[in-house]
Amino acid sequence: MDVAFRLLARRARSEAEIAAALERAGASRSLVRAVLGRLRSLGYLDDSKLAVDCVERGKERGLGSLRIQDQLRRLGIDEKTVEDAALDRQEERELARRLLAERFTAADLADRRVASRAARFLAGRGFPAEVIDSLFDSWE
């Protein structure tokens, strides 16, 4: 339990992260299951809440759904929880539009080279191609 509490003292962790740390510390599988169950019952582990919090932080940082989902998968969050916590397309489109408006002017985006650079900027932040294409379709 000490290993788990030390990790949880720094930041919220996924069940997979805690399980991996306990296994590295030499805990048996039955002990790992028992510790995870106890931490869940105490409210210290909740992968769904962790996923929602990660999505909110990602939105605040201007990240698209692909980047956010990648982060969640690296934390060991299961695929269903990752999909349940995802941004909806309209919300993601508005976030991408806001990022473009902060970084580029409409006149700049009329230039194909600048528009291409803007599309790469959004792709690098994790926005899906459909969202990027829909923004540039509405600009033309």
Image (cartoon, helix red, strand yellow):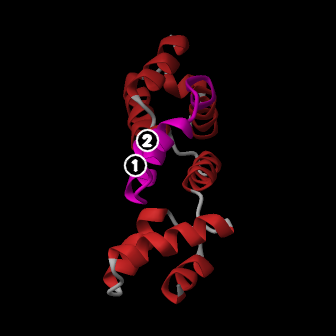
Q: Amino acid at mark 2?
A: Gly
Label 1 environment density (alpha carbons within 10 Å; few <14, some 14–19, many ≥20): some
Q: Is residue 133 above or below residue 100?
A: above
Mark 2 near mark 1, Cβ–Cβ under 8 Å?
yes
Identified at 43% across, 27% down, the residue is 115
The correct choice, above or below, for 80 with respect to 90 in the image is below
Magenta stretch in the rendered image? 67-92
Q: Which residue is mark 2?
A: 126
Please indicate whether residue 17 sits to the left or right of residue 91 in the image. left
Q: Is residue 116 above or below residue 26?
A: above
Within the magenta stretch, is there residue 70? yes
The residue under the point 57% across, 31% down is: 92
Residue 83 shown left or right of residue 117 in the figure = right
Which element type, helix, strand or loop, lies under badge 2?
Answer: loop
* Quarter residue 62 falls in: top right
Instruction: Name the residue that disc number 1 marks.
Output: 70
Q: Which percent across, then down, holds residue 59?
A: 61, 45
**Coordinates of residue 89 in the picture (x, y in percent):** 55, 25
Residue toward you, 51 or 123: 51
- Residue located 45% across and 25% down the image: 132
SS at circle 1:
helix
Q: Position of residue 107 (x, y in %)?
A: 57, 23
